Amino acid sequence: MTEDWQNGGFGLYLHWPFCQAKCPYCDFNSHVSREIDQSRWLRAYIAEIDRLAAMVPGRVLTSVFFGGGTPSLMNPDVVGGILGRIRHHWPTANDMEVTLEANPGSVEAGRFAGYAQAGVSRVSMGIQALNNRDLVRLGRIHTVEEARAAFDIARAQFDRVSFDLIYARQDQTLSDWQDELRQALSMAVDHLSLYQLTIEQGTAFGDRYNAGKLRGLPPDDLSADMYQATQEICDAAGMPAYEVSNHALPGAESRHNSLYWRYGDYLGIGPGAHGRLTLNGQRHATEQWRMPGKWLAQAEAGNADEALTALPREDQAVEFLLMGLRLTDGIDPRRYEALAGHALPEAKLRYLMDLGMIDHGSIHLRVTPQGRMVLNAVLEQLLTD
């Protein structure tokens, strides 16, 4: 019997929690540490890989993603050791994607050849801005010149290279963003992740915003204009959106992130890592201990999971909808019905179709370009009585 996760595939996310500095907008689980025993961390990651492999043996692994933090601070032999253990335990797809997130500094770029030799096939670079003033504001410790040099090194080592940019930044005009995006497209290999700046509580930017000290943020209508310009410019360059914030040449979509959006199973390994794992027909949410020292001790003791929680079918259906409607291709509503035990509300579907927010048929449900601009409102309509 086919289990639901097989519609999305099976992958592995590995979290490296360390950074050289904490960016003020970042709410990820990242920590600055002066000394890291990388050999000890490798042994702990391997212990967790061994434990989880015993729980789900034999599955074909389609993607591995090293996220963080700053995984490009990992020694290449640590990356190689992890990938070797993964391949020891699971059969891998012929085109398995192995992505590593990297900061575009000279130190990290010096490791790129080692990562390629270790088995990394794709690099995702956190460039974030293409002018030095905004890089300083964003707390980045690289310059535009360093970013471009690192990008050239990455392009020489890897066939697939992506990079991130943040827009709707302080004092940024629409023409500023249009010019910067065109620069980015002239550099791009096959993939771009383009995010609007969001102010998250618990970050340095969140604290400044609450105190009225984060000035120059664009009003909502300007942010919407920037989003619309992003779609138009990327479409014209042949790199359309396949997800709300991600653009790629046809066939170059991130396979690992697509696994999340298509609601597959994935193992989450590392401090604070989350996962989704189907065991004996029941999908579970997993969460590992968040603080690096606690995680390391628990991994060495035999189990770094803080929680393994069975997910009710209705919760699975909601997660599937929240993730899948981010994709330009949308979802198959029959899969939602199989998970939830009931169809989406027909009256809500007709209402959203009449507004031009969704495109709905018997085997597809997609959010239109107009609807993607207000995706949260569309989802709220579908998920409330």
Image (tube, helix red, strand yellow):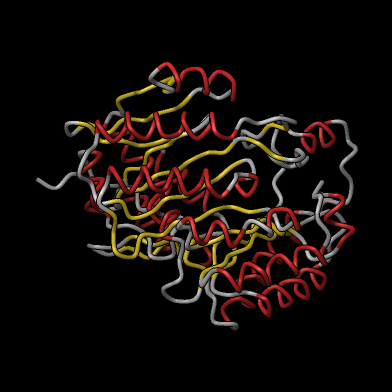
On the rendered structure, is 176 left or right of 29?
Answer: right
- Residue 1 visible somewhere in the drawing: yes
Q: In this figure, what is the number of numbered marks?
A: 0
* Residue at image point 30% right, 52% down: 8
* Residue at image point 46% right, 26% down: 288
Foreground residue among 289 and 343: 289
* Residue at image point 77% right, 68% down: 177
Screen quadrant of the C terminus: top left
- Residue 356 visible somewhere in the drawing: no
Foreground residue among 229 and 285: 285
Screen quadrant of the N terminus: top left
Foreground residue among 178 and 145: 145
On the rendered structure, is 27 left or right of 235?
Answer: right
In the displayed orientation, state which residue is furthest to the left.
Answer: 1
Identify whether 160 is placed above or below 209.
below
On the rendered structure, is 90 left or right of 84?
Answer: left
Residue 163 locus on image (x, y percent): 63, 63
Identify whether 282 is placed above or below 108.
above
Residue 137 locus on image (x, y percent): 86, 49
Residue 151 locus on image (x, y percent): 68, 68
Identify whether 175 is placed above or below 39.
below
Residue 90 locus on image (x, y percent): 27, 46
* Residue at image point 59% right, 45% down: 75
On the rendered structure, is 332 left or right of 272?
Answer: left
Q: Residue 27, located in which quarter of the rendered image?
A: top right
